[in-house]
Amino acid sequence: MGGVTNQLTLSTNASRGNKFERLGHRGISEVKNHPWLKDFDWQGLYNKTLDPPFVPPKEDNYDSKMTNHLFKDSYSKKSIMDAVEMLNNGIKDLNGIQNLFKNYYYDYREKAECKVSNVSTIKECKDPKVGTKPQTG
């Protein structure tokens, strides 16, 4: 599979409506072993030794010249009017948008309760609908 295909399968499988079919439901190893993430340095992430992709110069961290001009104008009158026009013209059927998520199940009260027994390898998770199962990672 190519890079773009792997990205698509990762995002599609991670956002499946049925939580039992969702990528990662069977444990973090399911995500870690996905082809798009196969070469990712998980140990470096855990150890916090990965280099960030961009580090702004310290002297410019709060300098206005580092601020994106689009961000500064994001609340301008024109952008608000554009948003209102877009809502009036393009998103009239809010029920249609809600229907996109009709089979997507998530209930925050059913979050798995996990106990960490060895931080780098095993978590014991109890899912209200599935029961207790080890998750390697």
Image: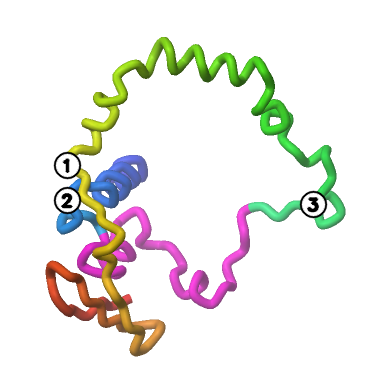
**What amino acid does circle 1 point to?**
Asn
**SS under mark 2:** loop
Between the residue at mark 2 and the residue at mark 3, the CA separation in whole angstroms equals: 43 Å
Q: Is residue 95 left or right of residue 4?
A: left
What residue sits 35% from the left and 53% below the top? 36
- Sequence-earlier tag: 3 or 1: 3
Which residue is drawn at the image coordinates 65% and 28% (left, top)?
A: 74
In the shown orientation, is residue 40 left or right of residue 125? Answer: right
> Does residue 110 lie above or below 5 as drawn?
below
Is residue 136 inside the magenta stretch?
no
Which of 7/94 is in front?
94
Q: Is residue 50 magenta?
A: yes
Q: Which residues are magenta?
A: 24-53
Residue behind mark 1: 103
Of mark 1 and mark 2, the one earlier in the sequence is 2
Observer-side mark, 3 or 1, equals 1
Task: Using the image, tell me which numbered label, if any, was put on residue 18.
Answer: 2
Disc 3 and disc 1 in contact, CB within 8 angstroms: no
Look at label 3 and name its amino acid: Asn
User: Is 6 on the left or on the right of 40, as rendered?
Assistant: left
